[in-house]
Image (cartoon, grey):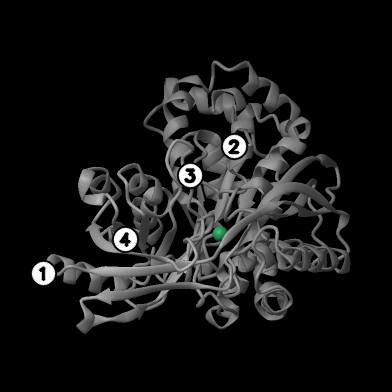
Amino acid sequence: MLPLFATLLLLLAAPVRDTGVNAEPGAVAAAAVVAPAPAQVSNAGAALTTAPAAAPAHVTDVTDVVAGYADEVAAIMAESLARGRAMERLTALCSTAPRRLAGSPGYLAAAEWARQTMLADGLENVRWELVEVPHWVRGSTGRVRLVEPAAHAAELPMLALGGSIATPPGGITAELVVVDSLDAGKLLGEAARGRIVLFNGPLDPTLPTTFAAYSGAVGQRGAGATVAARQGAVASLVRSMTTRLDDNPHTGAMHYADDVPRIPHAAISTLAAEKLATLVAAGQRVVLHIEQNCETLPNEQNPNVIGEYRGTTRADEVLVVGGHLDAWDVGQGAHDDGGGCVQALEALRLLKTLGLRPKRTIRVVMFANEENGLAGGRGYAKAHEGELPRHVLALESDSGSFVPRGFSSDATGDTRELLAAIVELLEPWGAGTLVQGGGGADIGPMRAHGVIQVGLKPDSARYFDLHHSPRDTIEQVNPRELALGAGAMAALLYVAADIEPGFTREAAESR
Ligand SMILES: [Zn+2]
């Protein structure tokens, strides 16, 4: 996932949205098309102008309507916990296609598995929609060797970063320089020339969530090679993006700038990074040998996999639920994002099994290429642009399959109030909190079109122990935690897709 991307979008959009919501003609048009809520709007206005101290009347109204869904929510959660199939499906996905990076044969195997699963569940309009994706392969060789000081010679746990070029045949041997941030790297100047630069900034453990810590550090992975090469470095390394101190290396996406030479970029384990930094800080001359033969092949066509549970009386209004079907080529992508994919599939299956068919259509989308391009999310928004004015809300699960605490959204005003009331129905299962935040990278491109963004928020403490690493396997997923998330998503979707008067879309032009 790309929390940094989501954060940037939020920061860029916030000032505009705050001043422009009511002035935008797009807001009125969108509300008229989808789900007008005149009672909510007029009551809110009255409350603000005439009785600011009293509880606005519409709060009670919304709460009462939402409370009417408590029995259905309980039934959905019970079905998921007693007879859910999320774990069975995640096991199938992780054994059918453990390696499923964009462009790989594994991705196509996963896409066919998803299509067959949707057909088996009786979903409607099941289809593939192709998007163009990059095709990067890790190759057969990847090593970082500590050569000097000779007394410390050792192989260091490493993974090439997605998008990196190979080293020349025979590898690169050079002296190491260490910095503790991307900004510090920009100040290296001549000290970087001919050297290997290690970006050793750790994830900040004092931040409230590991996602915030990841966002603060991941720029070193994405842009480290560019910063180092701009000053003449011959290769670059990054400390793995994890809060743990261990020997488990974590891969992820990196990118080059057009005006700078491309140099190889790889991640080493946090313990290896600590060891190198300690030697350099002690005044030792440290020499590394780096060798990797990863490469970028011609682009491929990969599908977003789509199916629907058609609504009853408002079937042309759509709620999207999804995760990304691609995963890094190490481990099995069990938490990132196999779990999110099976939770999205399971949400529709639970509702169908219980005979709960809401008024609006719920569309499940398994997105392609989130990890190294976001072509699936961008492609969906582009291909469905004409239909997006009738997309009400999009929900993504891409923060791990750990125990759900609630949901995140950057929605405001009446939209947020209604969303919070629905989420609160999940309080008995510990998932009743609505926090500020984006929905997910894949649904992000729909945000500019006014589609309400919602993300499942599991506990984040352990996510970056596993993320993008060989340890992200099925054994790390707890069946009950996975089922709690699937049930919570199904419950939120059901109420949001069925409730009247329903959500008023966000103002598209103001975002
Ligand atoms: Zn992800």
Residue 54 seen in this snapshot: yes
Q: Nearer the viewer, residue 92 or 246?
A: 246
Residue farthest to the left, as pictured: 283
Q: Going by the image, does 265 lie left or right of 78?
A: left
How far is mark 3 from mark 2, CA to CA?
Answer: 13 Å
Q: Nearer the viewer, residue 159 or 500?
A: 159
- Residue 250, x across and y down, in percent: 45, 68
**Callout 4 amino acid:** Leu
Q: Which mark is residue 447?
A: 2
Mark in the foreground, 2 or 1:
1
Whether 385 is drawn above or below 422: the answer is above
Disc 4 to disc 1: CB gap under 8 Å: no
Q: Going by the image, does 330 lie left or right of 47?
A: right
Q: What residue would you read off at disc 3?
A: 5
Say if disc 3 is inside 8 Å of ligand 1. Answer: no
**Callout 3 amino acid:** Phe
How far is mark 4 from mark 2, CA to CA?
Answer: 28 Å
For mark 4, does the 10 Å Cα neighbourhood hold few (<14), some (14 to 19), or many (20 or more) residues?
many
Disc 4 to disc 2: CB gap under 8 Å: no
Q: What residue would you read off at disc 1?
A: 282
**Which residue is located at x 40 percent, y 76 percent?**
157
Which SS class for mark 3? helix
Disc 1 to disc 3: CB gap under 8 Å: no
Among the two numbered marks 3 and 2 on one chain, the one whose residue lies closer to the N terminus: 3
Among the two numbered marks 2 and 1 on one chain, the one whose residue lies closer to the N terminus: 1
**Which residue is located at x 57 percent, y 24 percent?**
42
Among the two numbered marks 1 and 3 on one chain, the one whose residue lies closer to the N terminus: 3
Among the two numbered marks 4 and 1 on one chain, the one whose residue lies closer to the N terminus: 4
Which SS class for mark 2? helix
Q: What residue would you read off at disc 4?
A: 203
Ligand 1 - quadrant of the structure image = bottom right
